[in-house]
Amino acid sequence: MHSIQFLPQEVFTDVTSGEKKEIDLLAQCRFEQQDTCFLIHVENQSYTETAFAKRMFKYFARLYEKYDCAIYPVVIFSFDEPKRAESTNHSVRFPDLNVLDFNFKEPIPLIIFVLQSLSLLRTANDKLRLSSTFYGKK
């Protein structure tokens, strides 16, 4: 296996509302010369959403259940308004117990460039694969 393999987009259905959500980018990664893999889940958030951190946790939980490996969640907040820091944490707490403390990263500009480049590479690979299929090449 290559050190980075793009996986098909996952579609999750909210069991209470029936709304379908599709994750933006999912890549399976492997450290050099190691058998263990981890996932990088990249989500581009183009609008402000009150319960976004909770949605990221739901994605994480479903991916973790399906793939049973470490997942590194990353969000690119790409909206202009409102200009404020967005929450990168979803937690469930009681006065005497911290049940859940889920966090995700907002990447630094260099990582954004790399992630966007990987996304473009994936798009180019998908188009190449489609054109090869169309022309009968493998």
Image (spheres, grey):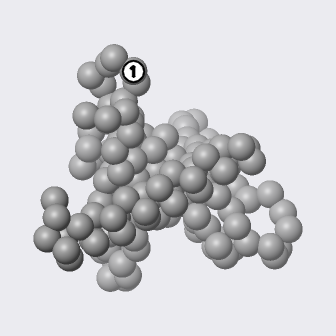
Q: Residue furthest top?
A: 33
In the image, residue 130 sits, relative to residue 40, either above or below, namely below
Give the image quarter of residue 84. bottom right
Quarter of the image containing the C terminus?
bottom left
Q: Nearer the viewer, residue 124 or 33?
A: 124
At a point 24% along the width and 49% down the height, the residue shown is: 66
Q: Is residue 60 visible?
A: no
Count of picture labels: 1
Pinpoint residue 131: horizontal percent, then vertical percent.
28, 72
Q: Is residue 135 left or right of residue 113?
A: left
Give the image quarter of residue 94. top right
Quarter of the image containing the N terminus?
top left
Q: Is residue 4 visible?
A: yes
Q: Residue furthest bottom?
A: 18
Pinpoint residue 17: horizontal percent, then vertical percent.
37, 82
Q: Nearer the viewer, residue 136 or 84?
A: 136
Pinpoint residue 122: horizontal percent, then vertical percent.
42, 58
Q: Is residue 74 left or right of residue 123?
A: right
At a point 66% along the width and 50% down the height, the residue shown is: 112
In the image, residue 2 sits, relative to residue 85, either above or below, namely above
Q: Nearer the viewer, residue 68 or 5?
A: 5
What residue is pinned by disc 1? Answer: 32
At a point 43% along the width and 64% down the height, the residue shown is: 123
Q: Is residue 110 left or right of residue 11?
A: right
In the image, residue 125 sits, relative to residue 49, either above or below, namely above
In the image, residue 33 sits, relative to residue 30, either above or below, namely above
Mark 1, other Cα within 10 Å: few <14 / some 14–19 / many ≥20: few
At a point 47% along the width and 55% down the height, the residue shown is: 121
**Secondary structure beneath label 1:** loop
Q: Is residue 22 left or right of residue 120?
A: left
Pinpoint residue 42: horizontal percent, then vertical percent.
51, 54
The three-letter code of the residue at mark 1 reads Glu
